[in-house]
Image (cartoon, rainbow, N blue to C red):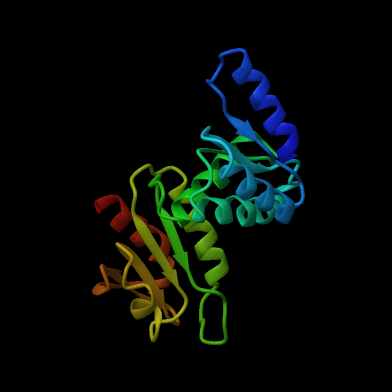
Amino acid sequence: MVEAALQQVKLLESLDFDLIKVSLKAFDVPTTIEAYQDIAQKIPYPLHIGITEAGTPRTGIIRSTVGISTLLYLGIGDTIRVSLTAHPREEVIAAYEILKSLNLRQHGPILVSCPSCGRAEVDIIRLAGEVEEKLLKIDKPIRVAVMGCVVNGPGEARDADIGIACGKGRAILFKKGKKIKVVEEKDFLKALMAEVERF
């Protein structure tokens, strides 16, 4: 791949054309990373990175994230494309999440949520899913935490702007790690989203 790309670059340069961007995307993640590392040392042109034909969202997002994140973390890449067998909006959402996870770009909220465990006394999976759905309609960069336990929740998510730590039938709402109020289970989603809007 690298040799073929370098031949094309030389051809364009021989025609006095230097508005070049190079893409070496492959399906295989290690191959893609090695190719970009190699060519990044050999040319001064911007690189368009991604994992091509990555698949459906379930596996394609993982494959794309591993490849794109590794390259970006190494300082390689100027533009990205997440290639999924899905609606193009899913590609854009995945790309923004990759950039947000590396602190390269802020775009909309970040959801922090704990895994389900034996301490959870509420359906944390359902609540986190509902919050995630509501956050899709918000553009401002805000970190929102949905935690399944009042013991560890506020401490584990202390960097969140707004959060909820749920217990049996009640939850603590917190802002920047400090408790602001207690809410009943029927109001978990509504109360949390009201604080997000207020923030």
Whether residue 90 is visible, yes or no, is no
Where is residue 28? Give x, y as percent.
76, 51
Displayed quadrant of residue 66: bottom right
Where is residue 13? Give x, y as percent.
60, 20
Quadrant location, the N terminus: top right
Relative depth, front residue between 88 and 120: 88
- What residue is drawn where x is 42% and y is 56%? 110
Whether residue 140 is visible, yes or no, is yes
Q: Which residue reaches farthest top?
A: 15
- What residue is drawn where x is 68% and y is 20%? 11
User: Would residue 122 appear left or right of 142 to someone viewing this image?
Assistant: right
Q: In this view, does 32 lie above or below 178?
A: above
Where is residue 22? Give x, y as percent.
61, 32
Where is residue 177? Give x, y as percent.
27, 73
User: Would residue 86 appear left or right of 189 to someone viewing this image?
Assistant: right
Displayed quadrant of residue 87: top right
Q: In this view, does 101 lie above or below 20?
A: below
Relative depth, front residue between 161 and 81: 81
Quadrant location, the C terminus: bottom left
Please state the total of marks drawn on the protein image. 0
Q: Is residue 175 above or below residue 134?
A: below
Q: Is residue 23 above or below residue 105?
A: above
Relative depth, front residue between 182 and 152: 152
Q: Which residue reaches farthest front?
A: 14
User: Would residue 98 appear left or right of 185 to someone viewing this image?
Assistant: right
- What residue is drawn where x is 64% and y is 47%? 38
User: Would residue 101 appear left or right of 8 to someone viewing this image?
Assistant: left
Relative depth, front residue between 11 and 47: 11
